[in-house]
Image: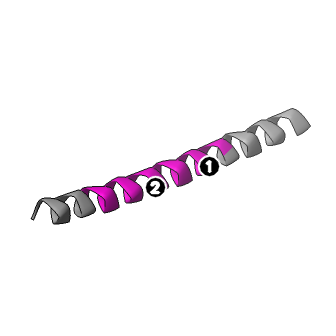
Amino acid sequence: MKGDMEKMFGLVYECFLISYVLTNEFFSNKFHFISIVYLDE
C-alpha cells in the first residue's frame, strides 16, 4: 500500500512539474512575442 501511495505521488508530482514547465514556456514565449511586437512599432 505504501509503495502504491509513493507511485501515485510520483505521478502527480511529475504531471505538476510538466504542466508548470509548459506554462512557464508558454508565458515566456508570450511575453517575448509581445516585447517583439512593441519594439517593432
Question: How far from the left and from the top, in percent, is residue 28?
Answer: 65, 42
Question: How far from the left and from the top, in percent, is residue 23?
Answer: 52, 50
Q: Quadrant of the C terminus?
A: top right
Name the residue rendered at 80%, 35% in the picture: 38
Question: Vertical placement of 39 versus 24: above or below?
Answer: above
| CA distance for labels 2 and 1 | 10 Å
Q: Quadrant of the N terminus?
A: bottom left
Q: Amino acid at mark 2?
A: Ser
Query: Is residue 26 inside the magenta stretch?
Result: yes
Q: Main secondary structure of the magenta part?
A: helix
Q: Which residues are magenta?
A: 9-28
Which is nearer the eye, 31 or 19?
19
Question: Vertical placement of 36 versus 8: above or below?
Answer: above
Question: Vertical placement of 16 versus 31: above or below?
Answer: below
Which mark is first along the chain, 1 or 2?
2
Q: Amino acid at mark 1?
A: Glu
Name the residue rendered at 32%, 57% in the picture: 10
Numbered marks: total: 2
The disc at residue 25 is 1
Res 40 quadrant in image: top right
Taking the image as shown, residue 38 lies to the left or right of residue 26, namely right
Q: Please, which colouring scheme is shown? A: one colour
Give SS at disc 2.
Answer: helix
Extreme-right residue of the structure: 40
Can residue 39 be seen by looking at this rendering? yes
Question: How far from the left and from the top, in percent, is residue 27?
Answer: 59, 45
Can residue 41 be seen by looking at this rendering? no
Name the residue rendered at 82%, 40% in the picture: 36
Neighbour tally class for label 1: few under 14, some 14-19, many 20 plus, Cα within 10 Å: few
Give SS at disc 1.
Answer: helix
The disc at residue 8 is none
The disc at residue 19 is 2
